[in-house]
Amino acid sequence: MDAKSPKPKRNIACDECPLVCSGDFRAFSDAELRFVSTFKRGELVSDAGSTILVEGTHSPHLYTVLSGWGFRYKTLEDGRRQILNYVLPGDFIGVQGSLLSEMHHSVEALSDMILCVFERSRLFELYEKHPELGFDITWLAAREEQMLDEHLLSVGRRSAAERAAYLLAFLNERAESVALFSRGNRIAPLTQQHVADTLGLSLVHTNKTLRKLTSQNAIAWLDSGFEIKDIDVLKQIAGWDGLPEVARPFI
Amino acid sequence: MDAKSPKPKRNIACDECPLVCSGDFRAFSDAELRFVSTFKRGELVSDAGSTILVEGTHSPHLYTVLSGWGFRYKTLEDGRRQILNYVLPGDFIGVQGSLLSEMHHSVEALSDMILCVFERSRLFELYEKHPELGFDITWLAAREEQMLDEHLLSVGRRSAAERAAYLLAFLNERAESVALFSRGNRIAPLTQQHVADTLGLSLVHTNKTLRKLTSQNAIAWLDSGFEIKDIDVLKQIAGWDGLPEVARPFI
DNA sequence: CGTACTCTTGACCATATTCAAGAGACGTGG
DNA sequence: CCACGTCTCTTGAATATGGTCAAGAGTACG
């Protein structure tokens, strides 16, 4: 509902898109840029804490994150929540789970966010007119699967400390790759409850695990967020080598 | 290595494909069928227990499962294994995790399997010439994500009994939807070690959990496999409503 | 007829959860 | 300006859940 609250729509033209210009993503051809410009329907400005998509509903839109960050999650009937993944600038939202039927997960903003809005009903047109872009969407879906696979391995088979270390290192790498949180390197806002719901642990145990990482000088937790103090120690605790570097496509 | 052992190649023509004929999947247009026929490079016959894809390697192929079943998994350096999902007839293998770079997971056959082999290097051609098929591949990737999301919710937030009940009910529904294991309704072969590695539990605890489900007359475990005795009880324990029914595409 | 694999069970231990309580920061309204 | 509620983090203690170790039974297979 928050998502529908009337907000002023800024309109950034696609050829001035800060993400395209950043060089972090694959460059569009002129024809692609023209098509994407017509595919774009507007912008959605969401406040921190607001819900962008709701499990069980049918969204007519697809989104690309322009700024800010949030998370995808599912809940059980009694309220238990599992965070599935985080959405950062450049991430495409709305394809996960299903292309055409109702949403099977919710998305909530952690910080204030600006999202680029596309019409879901025109998605097939994109495949017809610009196969490269269709291919890119599949590429993004495959990348999301890769993250989910690793996350599942983490929750299923890593110890609490390994899981926590993996998550924080993972978020740090993802943030760095899109130059999010540049000032001070502090990753925020994020509460220990979010971490707990991502790791599949209780809040109390998460707190104790994070304190252990702090006492090892791997991280510092402050307010609602954290800083990486020693990424090598963190990765070593996690037994994780980091994300592969690749040129990312982008819609 | 097992995957490369020389096996006689049967050649089922695409227009006689048992899966296309089964009616469980979206029908191809004539043009699509012709293209898929040329896209298909051969068949791979894999024995139960053999490895089809290996994490860290670069596979030149994509596969569609024609018969039998197997599982996707990842391992940690010390051998801990997490099963990510199962592959059943009609499932497309090789897009999960990445389209173009090395595999981030392995695939192993549970039963003897026959797979339809495609050339990965021609995937983009498919997007160019048959946008519907490209769209279908994205659809399949989204469906895989949906399963992973639910699985992650399970491992992260459900209790051992809920997880086990969910998994068995899930496998049953998936098997039914492609008429796998029709005779006797027994889902096999599958060891309790597989179940444990899927649920993120130890073998011993998995055994105790399955015995509990047995004593509630929800399932029967026999040899290497199980039978559903009461799907409603199982779903109720899991707190799960079942998979949505949809017409599936297929490559 | 031994060997390997799967399942089973009990006993003990480790890990993680729940419950409870309190500290500190922040914003709001009196 | 202060009192109050809310939110986040922290800690200890009791408890529950699940893991590890160990051993044995049943079956299949060479």
Image (cartoon, coloured by chain):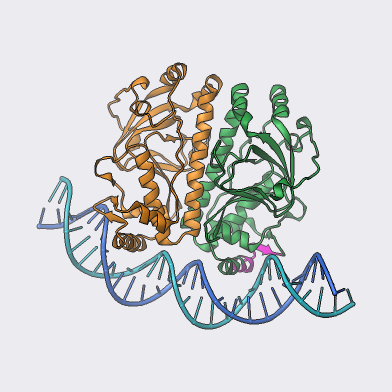
Chain colours: A green, B orange, C blue, D cyan
Q: Position of residue B237 (x, y in %)?
A: 40, 58
Q: Position of residue A201 (x, y in %)?
A: 54, 63
Q: Which residues are magenta?
A: A211-222
Along the viewing direction, whichever of A108 and A15 lies nearer the viewer: A108
Along the viewing direction, whichever of B24 and B193 lies nearer the viewer: B24
Q: Position of residue A188 (x, y in %)?
A: 71, 56
- Residue A146 visible, this orientation: yes
Q: Which residue: 30% across, 25% down?
A: B9
Along the viewing direction, whichever of A50 and A162 lies nearer the viewer: A50
Q: Quadrant of residue B235?
A: bottom left
* Residue A216 in magenta stretch: yes
How many numbered discs sit on the rendered protein? 0
Q: Quadrant of residue A34?
A: top right
Along the viewing direction, whichever of A158 and A223 lies nearer the viewer: A223
| Left or right of residue B102, residue A18 in this image | right
Residue B114 sits above or below residue B28 on the image: below
- Residue A237 visible, this orientation: no
* Residue A19 in magenta stretch: no
Quarter the C terminus of chain A occupies: top right
Q: Position of residue B133 (x, y in %)?
A: 50, 26
